[in-house]
Amino acid sequence: MKGIRTILVWLLCAGFACNLPEYYLDRDREEWALPLLNGEIKAMTLLENSVTLGEIRVSQDGTLAIHYTGEILQKTKKDIFQPLPGNLPIPMTDTLNEVTLPVVNNMIIRRAVLGKGNYSFAFGHQETEPVSLQLWIPEMVYQGQTVQHKLEIPYAGETNTSGISGPHPLEDIRLIPVNNKVGLHYRALASGNRPFLLPSLFFYYDQLDFKYVEGFIGQNIYDLKSDTIELDLYDGFVQGGLYIDEPRVTMQVVSSFGFPTKALVHTFEMRSGQGAPVSFQSKILDEGMFFDYPALGQAGQFKTTTFVFDPSNSNIREVFNAQARFLIYDVDALSNPLLVPDSSYFITDSSRFTIHVSVDLPLRGRIRQYPASKIFNLDGGQLSELKEGRLVVQTENGLPLSASAQIYLNDLSGMLIDSVFTGYKDLFKPAPTDSEGKAAGTASYQYEIPVPAARIGAWTKTRSVRVEVFFDSPPGGQVVGIRAEDKLNIKLGFIGKIK
Amino acid sequence: MKHTLRRILTPTLMCAVTALSAQDRGISLFNNTQIYTGRNPALPFPKEFVIGLPEGAGSLVLETGKGPWLIDRADGGKDFSLASGWAGLEKNNYFIDGEWKVRTFFLGKKWKYGQLGLSHEWEGHSSLRFNKDLVGLLGFGNYGYLQVEPRASSQPLDLKSEGEHFIFQAFTLQSALFRNKWSVGAAVRYLGGIQDFHTDILKLKADIRDPLVLKMEEDWSFYSADLVETFSVDSIRLSKSNGLAPGRHPGFAFSIGVQYKAPRWRAALQLKDLGSIRWRKGNRFSRSGNTLYQGIQGIDFLNLNENIFDQVRDTLHALAGVEKSEASFTRSLPASLLAENQVYFSDRWTVGFSADYIFSRDYGYLMAGAVYRPFPIWSFGGQMSLDTRKDWNLGLLTSLELGVFNLFFATDHVPALWKLNKADRLQARFGLALMWD
């Protein structure tokens, strides 16, 4: 009889076929799966969205690191060794006048190559005949020859004869003082080679500068300005939420000054957003920071000294993980810190001294409830095509982190319409890790976001979606490392009934 | 895609089942006393003058499993449920074949050595061959089918199916010549196509194993004339053009027949409906290639575009785009070869045999039956047939001859009395004519 009934049903259907309004297609059991989106979140991108002040780098082992850098503090030869102004005439009252060189910047000059500047001689006499004047300075040599000048001063019929020789350039004259003294010699001859003392003879120079100066340098303090490095990695974390296992501060000093220097650390501390400053403690600071320098004969070379503050030699781990926000440092340099007697050092015209402080925060550590929030504009009107169902999210996580999230739906005015979950919902599970805490595979996870028929109407008014995500490293305090290639693949699809 | 397939499938199914009844088997037992569509043109008219009034004939053969395709709704209505129908499908391939004919008039005149007739008919043929997976996919959706059909989670689904539907009208002119015991006849039909739809599916596979990955292998096309106007992933628009316009889709067909008549028996042979219709203003919709869709790729979830849903929709449209082109095509009518034989034992008893074979459908039958005439005005009979699907059928027929008024009713299958092995069948033919000498 079932066959008969079937035929009768067919007959009935056939008779009215295409025009029967009371016959509907039964779609109650349809459940369609529709892939929507397939994408990924790269660890690099995630970090780029969280860090704006630092530079994201990839360490040699592939781990991501954030590099914050301070200003390059610099002192040049001009900053610490200004040219000596001249202008005051040095009287030459005798045929040999020994002039003691000034101690410039606590430096006793033993050898030098002079820089830009000029010198000249001014003379005067009452002889009534032509005069021959010869001047020389044995401690000054130019192109292998002692600096000397010979002047033939004609008689002009005046009672007093005067004049100026020069200006003569000082540049590239080699200065080799004896006992820090330079001898100014002259010989004046009248007719018949009669020597006589000039009643008036002066040596002028407009400035005394050095292209190279060598000698004993005493202790000078070179003031380098204070600097602050601002960090933003810890922003948004609750206290202790981010634990970086191996933070590192690097101070790199490059010097082409030919004398030893020691850092005078006035301030080297970390400030959190609100808390009191926390000072660095390190045996590096205790032992003193001596900067390497080019030795005599290495003029023009740069010597680099690097100091790395890490957990092995400092309390940096505690300092940074106390919600670091600002690294403040104020360092001066002290020359010849050991004050070696009779030591000989040098300065060249291009000598330079730079201090560069940087902070590296390799992403190896622990995370607890690291927040990420983002608002997406989304036209929920398209949801009207859906009847009911659920959004299915499949994750393939290569990050050694898990996350939970809540999704808030807002209308055009930004008012909250609904939240997708009743509470925070796990989004993905952490990838398995190797002994170093790096991801050694992926973790698959699937969850569903219900799209109930009763709420679709309200959801269609959605114009923006605020996603709040909290990231966590695996429980148990395991330290994990995040590499540049780590990523989270996400497939999003809809399963349910479609209108 | 599902919308489109469903919207194609549903009207096709519905239109297919509009065809009432089945092939002409038992009616041949009345071929010496009644006038009906498809009658061998070599057979002399029963009377000198014949005016055929409307006649209807139709057949429906369906093998659709044991499931209830129509289910009751709470409000008393019915739902056409693919999911319920699927539950009764035990093998993979099923079919629905239907055809109907309506004669509007027939005028015939017989002379001593010949006869001439003119008639007009409407005819429709529908055929659908589908498989279990296609029904399941449409009834349950890709995800739903994955839950109910274990094969769906282990292998791609072959959805290859076939559909055919066409309607035309015909003006038929037939004549015959009689010579002693022999008569030969021919019928020429001018055909006017009204609508056509047929598929040409070389490959149609869906891989739904991963709910979030859609894989399709496709190489198919379907042709339509005055039925489907536009077709896309989520919509189908039926044609508003008028297939009734004269000469829009012209065609010709002819039938030839021969009869030998002895005093106690006669035999006839007919080659029927050799011809075709040229569908001149049609469309071809096609898709070819492999599709892999996993959602919009390369999405940066941290920087989602606000129009992402629009992108999804546009991407789906682009992926599921169907190529449309204008096409003219020729479709042959389902020609057949019909052999008939009657033996007259007395004025009351006639025994008859017939065999019919439809070439394009590779389908035929053998029939044997008898007619008893208890009174001059009333005849009735029965017949048994065996078709190439190895189904036995039991049919009944009856006629009344009330003066000039002649009417008949015949059915080739009586489901209440005889249950078929596999398919359900319904066939009926009813006709009325005025005949006199």
Image: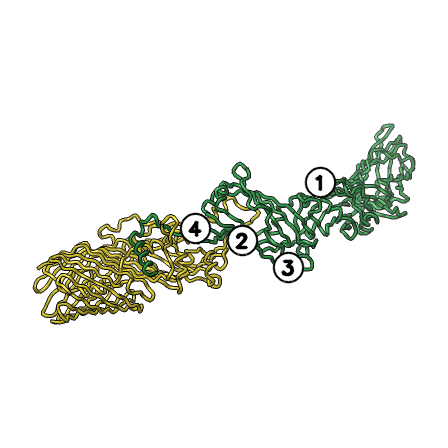
Chain colours: A green, B yellow
Q: Amino acid at mark 1?
A: Gly
Could you confirm whether marks 1 and 4 are on the same chain? no
Q: Secondary structure at mark 3?
A: loop
Q: Is residue A78 visible?
A: no
In the displayed structure, would residue A434 be above or below residue A406?
A: below
| Residue that numbered label 1 is attached to | A273
Which chain letter goes with mark 3? A
The label nearer to you, 2 versus 4, is 2
Residue to which mark 3 is pinned: A440
Amino acid on which the number 2 mark rests in the picture: Lys
- Seen from this angle, which residue lies furthest top? A159
- CA–CA distance in space, label 2 to label 3: 21 Å
Q: Are marks 1 and 2 on the same chain?
A: yes
Marks 1 and 4, how far apart at CA? 52 Å
Look at mark 4 in the image and give the residue it sits on.
B317
Q: Dot 1: within a 10 Å radius of its alpha carbon, few (fewer than 14), some, or many (20 or more) residues?
A: some
Q: Earlier in the sequence, mark 2 or mark 3?
A: 3
**Front-most of A133 and A167?**
A167
Along the polypeptide, which appears first: circle 3 or circle 1?
Answer: 1
| Residue A491, numbered label | 2
Instruction: Tell me the quarter of the picture where residue A372 sits.
Output: top right
